Image: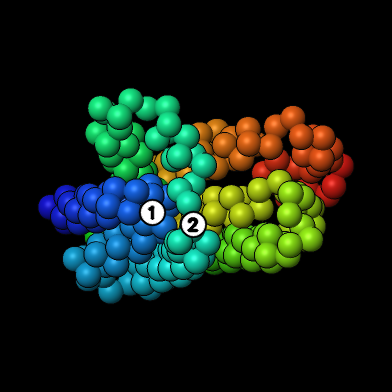
Amino acid sequence: MYYLITAAILFVFFVITFVIAQMMKNNGIVDIAWGTGFVLGAVASWLLGQPQGTVPLVITSLVVVWGVRLTFYLARRNLGRPEDFRYADMRRRWPSQTFYLRMFFQIYLLQLVLNYLVNLPAIVRNLEDLQGWNWLATIGLVIWLTGFIFESVGDSQLKTFKADPANKGKLMTRGLWRYSRHPNYFGEAAQWWGICLIAISDGRFIWLLISPLVITLFLLYVSGVPMLEKKYAGRPDWEAYKAVTSKFLPLPPGRS
């Protein structure tokens, strides 16, 4: 029952987000809601399950830290600006008669399902509880911290780079971006691998590995990496950067 209640709370949240986005004529709002949805699902399941163990509290805290940081970062970047090129392109290409229905099911409802699925390590452990902390949980925490550094520092470096007028039209190839073309996406995936290891540290619910697998595959092959790679494809500076920089995993320059 608590699993359904958590899902219902998320459904209402994404419906409200959809309505607000249509009123603002900016579907980029759903990107901001992405991180918030994880926070909502983790906190709601924690309140519903009222777990007593250390692991649920740590996992929920990690999800909240990740989600709040991402929400504020995207809100500061996107609010007050034109609709993201991805959604603007959909607005141009999709028939106006079915645009809103298609947008809700193909974008908002899909994000709802992904949000719930990826957040299952937090939801399940909050509702099932796990008392002890062991070496595997510690490894998971270290992986999460590594991912958090890559995502937050990578985002910060990119923001600083773009804020400098002298860099207009140029590619960010310094800092963490020297070792990965998408260090922020790598960091996001790493955090969910860390959270999942903590969640399965007692040897139960191994199937929760579906969470980091889904977010990693989604970032690599569906949204995130493919869209940005397509956006810059063909540019001489991008092709030169691509030839010497790893696509996802941070590696020494020259190993793409």
N-terminal of the two: label 2 or label 1? 1
Q: Is residue 8 left or right of residue 99?
A: left
Point 33% across, 57% down: residue:
37
Where residue 88 appears, as percent x and y from the top left, is: 45, 39
Q: Nearer the viewer, residue 218 or 193?
A: 218
Q: Which disc, if any, is residue 10?
A: none
Snapshot quadrant of residue 201: bottom left
In the rendered image, the residue lying farthest to the left is 1
| Residue 148 versus residue 253 in the image, above or below | below
Position of residue 99 measured from the top left corner of the image (x, y, whole percent): 30, 32
Q: Nearer the viewer, mark 2 or mark 1?
A: 2
Where does residue 166 sit, x and y in percent of width and height? 79, 61
Asked whether residue 120 appears in the rendered view, the answer is no
Relative to 126, is 225 on the left or the right? right
Q: Residues within 10 Å of mark 2 (few under 14, many from 20)?
A: few
Q: Amino acid at mark 2?
A: Arg
> Looking at the picture, which amino acid does disc 1 mark?
Ile
Choose between 69 and 95: the one closer to the eye. 95
The C terminus sits in image quarter = top right
The residue most toward the right is: 254
What residue sits right under mark 2 in the picture?
Answer: 81
Can residue 167 be seen here? The reply is yes
**Residue at 25%, 62% in the rendered image:** 45
Residue 131 appears at what percent x and percent y? 34, 69
- Please name the residue that numbered disc 1 is placed on: 29
Say if 252 sits above or below 86 in the image. Answer: below
Please name whichever residue, 200 or 24, is drawn nearer the observer in this view of the structure. 24
Q: Residue at x 71, y 46 (%)?
A: 181
Q: Residue at x 61, y 50 (%)?
A: 186
Mark 1 surroundings within 10 Å by alpha-carbon count, few (fewer than 14), some (14 through 19), many (20 or more) = many
Label 2, label 1: how far apart the Cα atoms are: 11 Å
